[in-house]
Image (spheres, rainbow, N blue to C red):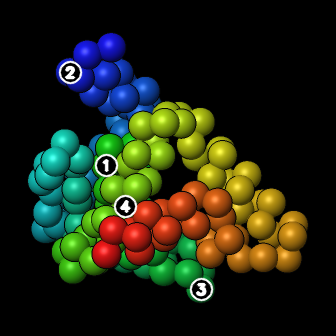
Amino acid sequence: MTGPMKRLAVYLWAAPVSVAALPLVALALVTRGRARCRAGILEASGGALRGLLTRAVPGFPISAITLGHVVLAATESALVDTRAHERVHVHQYEVWGPLFPPLYLASSVVALARGRGVYSDNAFEIQAARSTSSSA
């Protein structure tokens, strides 16, 4: 498969999750947040996302989250600080497509069943942390 065709294929593979994230991008925009496309990834930050992400999981504020080719961040600085890490998750979506969310959840359940951290011991988070620490 040629370069442009491969890029189209990975966008389409992750599209169901990316499209599902678009209402959150719209919410950010109508509540004075920002959105832009950077390196083929739609990034949104601020506005209502700040409260939504920081309160989504009690006791675990989310600074940024990736949904397909969309990255949502609580603040602009969180977006900058987590960009490399979130790019790894974009790549994971390109590999796993719409299977990624249930696989991510399953990895957290396995970690929990082993008495480990649902985030820090999630295999996908470990991969993202390793990738970003080796590129730093």
In this figure, which residue is indicated by the disc labeled 2? 4
Q: Which mark is residue 70?
A: 1
Q: Please state which of residues 10 and 17 is positioned toward the viewer in this rendering.
A: 10
Local SS, label 4? helix
Which residue lies most toward the bottom here? 59
Amino acid type of the residue tagged 3 in the rendering: Gly
Quadrant holding the N terminus: top left
Q: Residues within 10 Å of mark 1 (few under 14, many from 20)?
A: many
Number of numbered markers: 4
Task: State the image quarter where residue 28 is shown.
Answer: bottom left
Q: Please state which of residues 61 and 105 is positioned toward the viewer in this rendering.
A: 105
Distance from Cα at disc 2 to Cα at disc 3: 42 Å
x, y percent for residue 23: 32, 46
Distance from Cα at disc 4 to Cα at disc 2: 23 Å
Looking at marks 3 and 4 on the same chain, the residue that comes earlier in the sequence is marked by 3
Question: What residue is at 46 percent from the left and 42 percent from the top?
Answer: 93
Q: Which mark is residue 59?
A: 3
Looking at marks 2 and 1 on the same chain, the residue that comes earlier in the sequence is marked by 2
In this figure, which residue is indicated by the disc labeled 4? 86
